[in-house]
Amino acid sequence: MNSILLATSVSNGIGIFKPLYWLFGVVMSFLMDVLNNQYFIAIIIFTIATRLMLLPINIHQQKTMARTTRLQPKIQKIQKKYPDPKDRNKLNQEMQDLYAREGHNPMQMGCGPMLFQMIFLMGIIGIIYYPISYVLGISAVVDQSGEIYDVILPIYQNLIGDDSASITYFQLNILENFDAYKETLMAQFPDIFTTANCDTIVAYRDSMTLFGLDMTAVPHWKDGIIVIIPILCLVTSLLSSVVSTLIQRKNNPAAAQQQSSMLIMMLIMPFFSFYISFRVTAAVGFYWIISNLVAILQQFYTFKQYPPRKTQAQLMINNTIERRSREENIKKIK
């Protein structure tokens, strides 16, 4: 039977994000070249740079949250004025009038900024999960990923002693077990796994050793000290969630009324990342740790530079100036 028909479908990312994968891969490759193949320094610099690029959005959200908090007394007053569900249209109209007078768009607190951040962060997946094709530039691995998967799967199953095992993260698995796959891949796919490309993969893999830990390995409780990576993922993610929750309560005291639901949400993502960090290579966990630490510092910076009371006071002054300016313009027209 034709090998193409036998080939397994392998995920190589989401199509619409592949331009971002390529862009971030070029940046990461440049950093690796400049830093003499120092993977972990490169990933730290990359993470800080991408987080700084998202800083204006976080500042914007902070200001929008402060504006919403300042309007809460007026919003509650309107809600008390129309408690009857039959007056929903009147309630909505007065709310719209309030937002128009205050120059506030509550939708700015919604999905827009979060969606942009998610799209941006999705691009980072390219360099974390698909480094061979996007960082090392061996794009042909994607074109024949199904055939390559079928060739390495029996080798992988033999390595772990499980004939029913499958490979979840294809390119990360190649990195982790490249010593076992190398000769077969060079023989079966000589146009892709050339001597030069294999040397590049080996050099990249060798750079992924930190304090004697092989960060291409998937952490397991039986493997000793490497479990520190999932543990640090959990700790830093929890800390980031706690800091974020405390800052939100400072910005919006009304949020304290939703303490139980916020607590549940605060715990879900950290423990989910803890679970996932045992299913991906330690290098992915390392990225999450750095990302969490940078996020914590970024939250402290934003909160210090734009404290709720100061931000609300400045917004009130700006709003007064804008309203008087509009009134003067109306008078001139009349």
Image: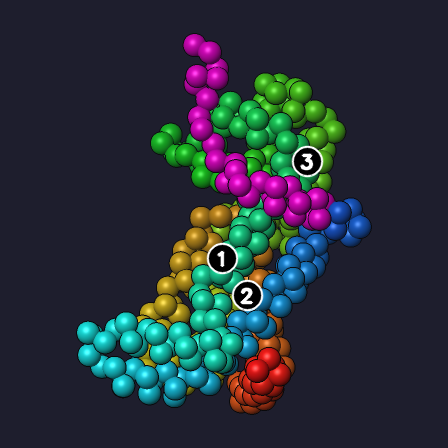
Q: Which sits earlier in the primary sequence, circle 3 or circle 2? A: 3
Quadrant location, the C terminus: bottom right
- Residue on which disc 2 sits: 292
Answer whether residue 300 is visible to the viewer in this image: no
Q: Which sits earlier in the primary sequence, circle 2 or circle 1? A: 1
- Outermost residue on the top side: it is 1
The local crowd at label 1, few if under 14, some if 14 to 19, many if 20 or more residues have their Cα within 10 Å, is few
Q: Is residue 178 positioned above or below 285 on the image?
A: above
Q: Is residue 170 left or right of residue 33?
A: left
Where residue 124 sits: x, y (%)? 58, 50
The local crowd at label 3, few if under 14, some if 14 to 19, many if 20 or more residues have their Cα within 10 Å, is some
- Foreground residue among 56 and 273: 56
Where residue 143 sits: x, y (%)? 57, 26
Q: Nearer the viewer, mark 2 or mark 1?
A: 1
The residue located at (48%, 35%) in the rendering is 11
Q: Quadrant of residue 140?
A: top right
Q: Is residue 19 positioned above or below 49 on the image?
A: above
- Residue on which disc 3 sits: 137
The local crowd at label 2, few if under 14, some if 14 to 19, many if 20 or more residues have their Cα within 10 Å, is many
Where residue 136 sits: x, y (%)? 68, 38
The reply to whether dot 3 and dot 1 touch (C-beta < 8 Å) is: no
Please state which amino acid type lies under the numbered disc 3: Gly
Quadrant location, the N terminus: top left
* Distance Cα–Cα, label 2 vs label 1: 19 Å
The residue located at (41%, 77%) in the rendering is 97
Q: Is residue 298 positioned above or below 72 on the image?
A: above
- Tag of residue 115: 1
Please state which amino acid type lies under the numbered disc 1: Leu
Q: Which residues are the magenta region? A: 1-29
Specify whether residue 76 is painted magenta. Answer: no
The residue located at (74%, 51%) in the rendering is 31
- Foreground residue among 251 and 268: 251
